[in-house]
Image (cartoon, coloured by chain):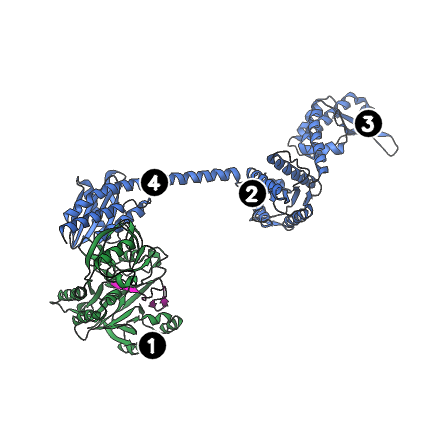
Amino acid sequence: MSEMTRTLQIISIQHELAMSIGLDLNLDKMLQLFLDRAKKRLSLRSAVVFKEAPRSRNDSDILCYPYNHRPDDTNDWLTEQVYEFSQLNVQNVCRQRGDSYYYLFKIPKFGAISFERKRTPIDDIVLNALSPLFSRLAVSCQACLEHQNLVDEITNRKAVEEQLRLQTYQDVLTGLPNRKMLNINLQSLLTNAQQHGQYGAVFFIDLDRFKLINDTLGHSVGDELLINITSKLKACIRRDDTLARVGGDEFILLLGDIGQTEQSAVGKATKVADKMLGLTRDSIELSRCAVFTSFSIGIALFPSPELNVNKSIADQAKQLIKHADIAMYKIKHTSRNDYLFYRHELQVMSTFRSEVEQRLHVALREEAFELYFQPMVNVAGAIVAAEGLLRWHDEKLGWVGPQEFIPVAEECGLIVEIGQWVLRQTCLLISQHLDWFAEGKLRYISINISPRQFSQPHFVAQVLEIIEEFTFPH
Amino acid sequence: MAVFSDVQFTPNVTVQALADSIAKLMLSQPKGIMILCSAEAASWGDDFKQYVGTLDVPIFGGIFPGLILDSRFEPRGILVVGLRTNIRICVIENVSTCAPLSSNMAYMSQSVNSVMILTDALSRQIDGYLQHVLGFLPEDCSVFGGGAGTLEFKAQPCLFSAAGMHQDAMILVEMSTQWDIAVGHGWEILAGPYLANSTDDNCVLELNFEPAVQLYERVVQEHSKLRFDEHDFFDIAKSFPLGLARLDDSVLIRDPLKLQGSGLICAGDVPENTMLYIMSGEADKLIEAASGAVKRTISFHKDEQGVSDCFLFDCVSRQLFLQNLFSNELDLIHREINPPHRTVGALVLGEIELDQSGILSLHNKTAVAALAKIKSHE
């Protein structure tokens, strides 16, 4: 081969190897490409990269360990050679073993590389041409490491973002969308429904007696029940429908595209509701027990004349959920284990109920209740006792019957304070008219106590405390 | 003592003819059988599978563009070779589509002395698999073989094992025999070097930043009277292969088989940014290179007991280039083998060889002869 061709050949090899550096951002792949090319072009038996690493915890020396080693017994010998080489202040050395020549080059700030050539050594002129390549290789190795750090950082950040996204939009226990996600989906469903003239439905699903199960069997059973119920409910709906958990035992289901007429929408929603009620016909088998439960389901269809289209989509969505909630509330306090479609009358009833609750607070504060006593007579027609009856005239609502305000007071808990007020008023009356009892005109006055008041932990103590306030024998 | 227990040839390429040949071969009690067939065997399919299922001797082989028996080149027929040594066969499937990983090949035993590799020549990633296989072999293991297929370059089953016929596969045959490998091609640099600045595995897309075919045709036409617009591409290209120069002054030949757009499809990978030469050859030099390599290798053993049988994997495009003179090459090679030892082999699409420097390469337009060391199998 002529001098010129030889020079050209060396330049071409140098160029080819230089061009094969940094072809991949993955360190392993980048090095592998370079090593493969070097093996072919330099007629090498093996090419190995060693990366710097601490030799041991107590040793600050640098150990180059096989970064990509060949599995044979030469490896230990080569590792030791590379370690010794790393201690020397030279850029390359050649070591001979058997008929093989091992050329070791330093890769600055990264490690070292070994080229094994069998039988014939590599010319000095080629070695000189190779030397500059390793600085370039070092830069690429650093770039790959930095890239990997960046990739790791981005991966970790994405993982955290995903975690945050899940926490923001997902219910941790069931994996279902939470209220936030539900609102987003409902708004998009409403927009679509308005654009395409398709009906949809919002189901407000409440698990009956969940609190009882939770309190008696424990939270772990309650959680297991919710997970079990979730998978059962999911089996009743389509892949694109949204089932969300919005409270302890409350779920909301969004159904889209259920028909172009109200009639067909009612038909399809009824079908789904029936399917859901069917889920609880038998007991639900949990890991350690079986429980009976049922659903109370309120359903609100959209589009609906009840929705104010002049309001924002977000407000309409809130209104729809409220409608379904009202319907659910109604069925829960009548029959349970059933479903009810929302209608305007329910809204009226609900509004009245809210007003009653609000005014009850005022009435209690201002002592606007009145206590009436109904005489109780014996067979001869003589009065022997009396029963205290609560009556309420509100300045806004007028006369409100006990059948209307007592259940509201029961639900919102005011019944306990109302009960105490009744007891106190009755005691006051007795203390003022002790002669009625001394003369035998009355034997007792009875009052009604709500079960909710009875279940108060210090009920007896509270009753005795009130009685103690008044001086009469007991 | 010979490596081959017996060799049978038949010009009929049918499963029945194969069965008849193997029946005769079995009289020599071989421990393994190599089956080399011409292109007509490609349609055997299930018949072959059914037949080899009845054999209780390990078998391997392939379909090739031609067969070699002693000094003869046979374009059509079946050659079956009985082996006296124990062999172990490993088939690697889906070579083109699966990355070369240890998981898709059975491990080589560490005590193996030699490995014959037959591969589907149309598979991609052949070189990647060869380098991967090399990583598992002991230091002094000899490796040789070739690419199977036909000159139609059609994707079809072209390898044989006891499981039937295989496509896009590689067969590794472990042997306890020690072989000396002789390699020669005789091609010389005509022009270059050119920078292969854009390649895709076995396709050279650009040379010196211009479409590869444009530069290649221009240079070849400058050095010959042949015009590409008057001949089939390969009719001219078979005389002007590409060469990758290596540091030990050897040149790895790449055969430009056909055009793909403005790219040159070669039989073997061409790494990007490699410097390529355009090569040319003369019949005498080609023949001398191949036979001379065998002669030199045998001469290393003149003080020992020498070599016995020979496997010869000669590139099909050497036969296409040398034409009638090809028989001279075979004759000169076989002449170095002492009777009663035999030369058997095939015309292949890419030759595989592990050289003395420990480099496992896929060659083109080259002759690879594996010569069995007598002392290794006595």
- Kindly identify the amino acid type of the residue bearing the numbered disc 2: Asp
Q: Quadrant of the N terminus of chain B?
A: bottom left
Q: CA distance from mark 1 to mark 4?
A: 61 Å
The residue beneath circle 2 is A223
Instruction: Give the chain letter at badge 3.
Output: A
| Residue for point 15% across, 69% down | B306
Of B129 and A4, the residue lying toward us? A4
In this picture, residue B67 sits left or right of residue A350: left
Question: Chain B's colour?
Answer: green
In this picture, residue A316 sits left or right of residue B349: right
The residue beneath circle 3 is A442
Check if mark 3's residue and mark 1's residue have beta carbons within 8 Å: no
The residue beneath circle 4 is A147
Magenta segment: does it hold B157? Answer: yes
Q: Quadrant of residue A224?
A: top right
**Local secondary structure at mark 3:** loop
Check if mark 1's residue and mark 4's residue have beta carbons within 8 Å: no
- Kindly identify the amino acid type of the residue bearing the numbered disc 3: Leu
The residue beneath circle 1 is B19
